[in-house]
Image (cartoon, helix red, strand yellow):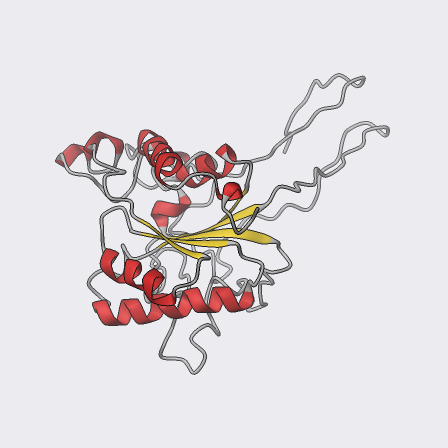
Amino acid sequence: VVVKSGLDASKIYRIELRIRGVHEEDDKWQYGCGVNIEGFHGDLPTARIEPWVDTRPKMLWIGDSITEGIVERGDAAGSQPLMSGGDQNWCALISNRYGLQDVRNGFGQSGIGKAGGSGKIPMYVDTSLTDPFSKSNLFHYQNGRLIDWEAQNIKFAAINLGTNDYGPLSLADFKARYKLLVLEMLRRMPSLVKIYVMRPFLGYYAAEIEAIATELGDPRVVYVDTTGWLTNPADTDGAEEGVVGAHPYHSGSIAIANAWESEVGNPLMQAAYA
């Protein structure tokens, strides 16, 4: 695959490669599909390709298809790869606005206690297991190898879960699992400065999520009330029905990023980090 041709040999170029081509319904977790990059090379013996090391603090976004950026470019073709846009959705906009690396852990149809219907992703907290996190997609790669988030230098995290849990999980069950997840993150990621626990944009389990932040009483855990952030149906995949849908288009992502700026602010300016 030729990434770029016709470059001036006397100049230095920075190339950012963004991959958008795996369908959200593909069997990612069970090795049914995926993208593997073996390396990059130039067509001249003198060509040098050096990796760019991104030293910015990292922001980890945890969620579902709303978080991964499905139908960011519209839904005329359904949830096809060309309609997705994790590189420019609200998570990316917020991260880039504040000079943070955007790290995403979002899988379609997944939830706190619901395995991902797309991609066969394990649920975040499985209380049927002796260790509820022994298979959690947040703490494991596909092959079961542990993710060392502390070594990844994650400074901030935001949880946007609950939309896909609504119905299958009772209020009490959801709250218990969500609280376990937050506590486990604090345990495994002691360098975290803030965990933003977000009210899902459609409001599911809002009271339970807010109560968790209050009950923990930990200044690192901050409840984000997203009420009013998405109000225009035209900004979401509910436009045709005239209702606010679950998935924002790019205009909705901009609205969310602007609301974050006015109501939450720059994570880097949080007192604990300073």
Which residue is found at the position 65% from the left and 25% from the top? 4
Vertically, is 27 above or below 216? above
Residue 195 locus on image (x, y percent): 45, 55
Residue 106 visible within the image: no
Residue 255 locus on image (x, y percent): 32, 32
Residue 155 locus on image (x, y percent): 55, 52
Residue in front for this viewpoint, 121 or 201: 201
Look at the image and tell me in which quarter the N terminus lies.
top right
Vertically, is 221 above or below 18? below
**How many discs appear?**
0
Which residue is found at the position 55% from the left and 36% from the top? 99
Query: Residue farthest to the bottom?
Result: 130
Residue in front for this viewpoint, 47 or 89: 89
Give the quadrant of residue 53. top right
Residue 267 relative to residue 5: left or right: left
Which residue is found at the position 16% from the left and 33% from the top? 240
